[in-house]
Amino acid sequence: MDWHQLWKITSAPDNVPIVGMLFLVPFFTWLGLRQARQTDRLIEQLEQDPQLAKTHHRKILPWRPGWARELHVWPFL
């Protein structure tokens, strides 16, 4: 199989979403595992320090002033 044949197969309209998924699925898997690891570290930190647990937020990315309160998605764009 040469590069021209590979390009012809992957650029076919019914294969384009599959090619896109080859990049998107590993990225979002990595992102989810990264956020899970950060949350686990935060839980361990809050379990070790009860005083911090009473005052500290329980999210790795809490809402901050200046951020939009609403996130408009597809139907509203």
Image: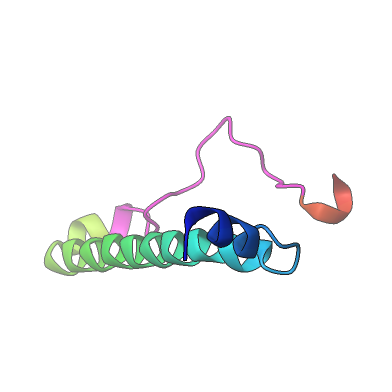
Q: Which residues are magenta?
A: 54-72
Of the pair 11 and 36, the residue shown nearer to us: 11
Q: Residue furthest left?
A: 48
58 is within the stretch colored magenta: yes
Taking 65 as reference, is 63 above or below it? below
67 is within the stretch colored magenta: yes
Quadrant of residue 8 in the image? bottom right
Give me the residue at 54% from left, 61% from top.
Answer: 6
Colouring: rainbow
Q: Residue 56: percent from the left, percent from the top?
A: 31, 53
Q: Residue furthest top?
A: 66
Taking 68 as reference, is 53 above or below it? below
55 lies left or right of 67: left
Quadrant of residue 42 in the image? bottom left
Taking 48 as reference, is 51 above or below it? above
Give me the residue at 67% from left, 61% from top.
Answer: 16
Q: Residue 3: percent from the left, percent from the top?
A: 49, 54
Dominant SS of magenta comes to: loop
22 lies left or right of 68: left
Give me the residue at 65% from left, 38% from top.
Answer: 68
Which quarter shows the C terminus? top right
